[in-house]
Image: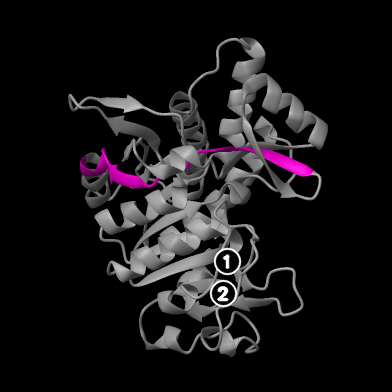
Amino acid sequence: MRIVVALGGNALLKRGEPITPEAQHTNVRIAAAALADLAQDHEIIVAHGNGPQVGLMALQAAAHAPETLWPLDILGAETEGMIGYLIEQELMNALPKGTDCATLLTRVEVDPEDPAFDRPTKPIGPVYSAAEAELARTRNSWSMVEEYKGGLRRVVPSPLPIAILGIKPIRLLVEAGVCVICAGGGGIPVVRGADGNMEGVEAVIDKDRTSALLAEALQADVLLMLTDVEAVFRDWGGPDQAAIGCVTPDALDTMNFAAGSMGPKITAACNFVRAGGTLAGIGRLQDARAIVEGRAGTQVRLDSLARETRPAGENKSARLSKGKPEAVRDHA
């Protein structure tokens, strides 16, 4: 099968872990081992998040020249190269000799009139205390949001991807048997001007939505979104918390997910299978193969298996697709 794998930022950097070269190398090496296992009998294309890294680079740039704030499209390109290099190196170390791998910077077109530019929702960078957040807000004119009690992060616009501009060379490499790493951080956000020329914009595209677009364009069988939680949960943190196993897009439509994290994953999963994909999976990095095989995580699909709305693990949330819509608390 052809599988597009979207590695979440939390799969490449543990929550609360400092962003250091050592931490990045260690976590990417772990991710590469899981990907190499999947690549034994499947064709994989790898995308990845960049939320912590792009926020760090923005801070470094601001500290170097406070009067000059580097735009997010350039910072996104830097992180795409940095993380792509780490994934490519560790993946090449883990894959059999003779395997070809390539990392591509990927521009992704967005709509300049997308309402997301007026409603920042994408968290990037480290978690701040209230005092630190207020200082960053005042100094850099950044929007901030509380991620959990007492912890705040910067949020930036996250417009919808319209088109992957480099899809032709990506497709050529994939068809030639090359393991391609692309669309990192959701891709470099660009808009088309009245003259047809492209220009970068101040945004970070959600990598899951771009990955769904990539998977559809490459006619992939599976879209696999890997993070650090075992599945999508209903009533996260509440008394009725339960993992969702196999489920249809229609059942997921009755629920609410936070826009900053799990929401885009659910949207990407539903869009992909409704466009003809066989399976969209969400779960932990170490469960990659088990998710594809239906033994772990959340599997979104249109066929009769999903209509049973089977839970992940114990069969205690089969009522998921019945009754009134339920709000699902964010957890990714």
Q: Position of residue 199 (x, y in %)?
A: 32, 25
Which residue is found at the position 61% from the left and 10% from the top?
A: 65
Left or right of 143? Residue 91 is left
Left or right of 129? Residue 180 is left
Most foreground residue, 287 or 320: 320
Up the image or down, 263 lies above or below 281; here it is above
From which residue to which does the magenta span run? 151-168
Check disc 2 and give the amino acid type: Ala
Residue farthest to the left, as pictured:
195
Badge 2: residue crowd in 10 Å (few <14, some 14–19, many ≥20): many
Specify whether residue 85 is in view: yes
Check disc 1 and give the amino acid type: Asp
Residue 287: which numbered mark, if any? 1
Circle 2 SS class: loop
Q: Where is residue 128 in the image (x, y as percent from the top left)?
A: 75, 36
Up the image or down, 304 lies above or below 95; here it is below
On-image quarter of the N terminus: bottom left
Most foreground residue, 241 or 94: 241
Circle 1 SS class: helix
Return the disc, 1 or 2, that comes first in the chain's sequence.
1
Residue 296: which numbered mark, if any? 2
Which residue is found at the position 45% from the left and 43% from the top?
A: 116
Q: Where is residue 271 in the image (x, y as percent from the top left)?
A: 36, 64
Specify whether residue 277 is in view: no
Query: Is the C-beta separation of discs 1 and 2 under 8 Å?
Result: yes
Report how far apart the C-alphas of labels 1 and 2 lie in the structure: 7 Å
Left or right of 49? Residue 329 is right
